[in-house]
């Protein structure tokens, strides 16, 4: 900090770089999450119909869609939670390094070991989740599990001191984009494709977006 503060040019450059990186990370993760939600919706026409009906009922006759509207969209919130459960964008979180010798679950972890938390597996643990491979947003009805880092069975933003600091912005972006997409358009698959054909494979990496890009056709409606 001393060198940064005494070199305003370097400080400005470092700050610009950091802001750009953080903003890019935030925008990309939110866009990829939105794509996953749309993927699950188009693959599950029953859920799409229910989510769209809710959005249209709540938003009906409003000129502006604002953040306060999100609170009233209970089903959409469950759809997003279920998307995070089945296809978390950062399935192994960011690795941690043991700062001292540890014992976790009976295993000896020497100091300096890198630890990966496999939330993909946690989110599909059959001891925690009933019918874990199925996309069922209703499982969150009367269920207190949230994604804010306090319920270890659902950790799409991580947990603890290094959990995602952009959770508020990310969730606002995801919700508001989805509300607009569902309110204003109907969605269909390209000709010849049915819901069962939708590809759910993830690509490989720290961040795991869809492997095969999602192709959807927006259809104008009376709400547009
Ligand atoms: C839906 C959108 C997002 C998802 C799913 C997501 C997910 C994550 C996850 C899983 C981590 C690692 C947490 C851990 O290992 O415990 C993380 C870290 C981080 N995220 Fe996000 N994120 C999202 C949006 C954002 C946004 C909008 C921003 C910034 C504007 C942001 C900035 C960061 C930063 C800076 C870190 C590193 C934190 C650290 O290492 O201390 N993220 N994110």
Image (cartoon, grey):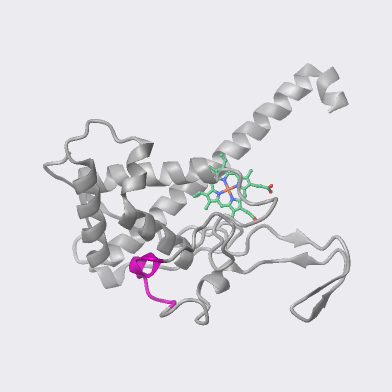
Percent from the top left, x then y, of residue 97? 79, 60
Check if residue 31 falls in the magenta segment. no
Dividing the picture into quarters, in which one does residue 19 lie? Answer: top right
Name which residue lies at 36% across and 38% down.
68
Dividing the picture into quarters, in which one does residue 112 lie? Answer: bottom right
Percent from the top left, x then y, of residue 197? 29, 70
Check if residue 133 falls in the magenta segment. yes
Q: Which residues are magenta?
A: 132-142
Above or below 78: residue 218: above
22 left or right of 7 in image: left
131 vs 189, nearest the viewer: 131
165 vs 211, nearest the viewer: 165
8 vs 168, nearest the viewer: 168
Name which residue lies at 35% across and 63% down.
40
Percent from the top left, x then y, of residue 130? 43, 79
Residue 189 visible within the image: no
148 left or right of 173 in image: right
Q: Main secondary structure of the magenta part?
A: loop
Percent from the top left, x then y, of residue 194? 23, 68
Dividing the picture into quarters, in which one does residue 53 lie? Answer: bottom left
- Please state the total of marks drawn on the protein image: 0
Name which residue lies at 31% across and 50% down.
73
Q: Quadrant of the C terminus?
A: top left
């Amino acid at each position: 900090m001393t060198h940064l503060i005494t070199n305003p040019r370097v400080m400005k450059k470092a700050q610009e770089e950091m802001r750009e990186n953080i903003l890019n990370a935030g925008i990309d993760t939110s866009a990829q999450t939105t794509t996953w939600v749309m993927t699950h919706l188009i693959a599950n026409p029953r859920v799409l119909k229910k989510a769209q009906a809710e959005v249209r009922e709540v938003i009906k006759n409003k000129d502006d869609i604002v953040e306060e509207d999100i609170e009233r969209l209970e089903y959409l919130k469950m759809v997003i939670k279920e998307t995070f459960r089945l296809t978390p964008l950062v399935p192994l979180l960011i690795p941690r390094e043991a700062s001292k010798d540890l014992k976790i679950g009976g295993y000896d972890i020497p100091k300096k070991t890198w630890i990966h938390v496999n939330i993909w597996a946690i989110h599909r643990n059959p001891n925690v989740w009933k019918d874990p491979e199925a996309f069922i947003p209703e499982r969150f009805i009367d269920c207190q599990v949230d994604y804010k880092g306090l319920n270890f069975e659902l950790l799409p933003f991580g947990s603890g001191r290094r959990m995602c600091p952009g959770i508020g912005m990310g969730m606002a972006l995801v919700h508001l984009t989805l509300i607009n997409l569902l309110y204003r358009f109907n969605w269909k698959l390209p000709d010849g494709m049915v819901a069962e054909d939708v590809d759910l494979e993830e690509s490989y990496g720290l961040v795991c977006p869809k492997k095969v890009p999602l192709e959807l056709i927006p259809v104008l409606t009376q709400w547009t």
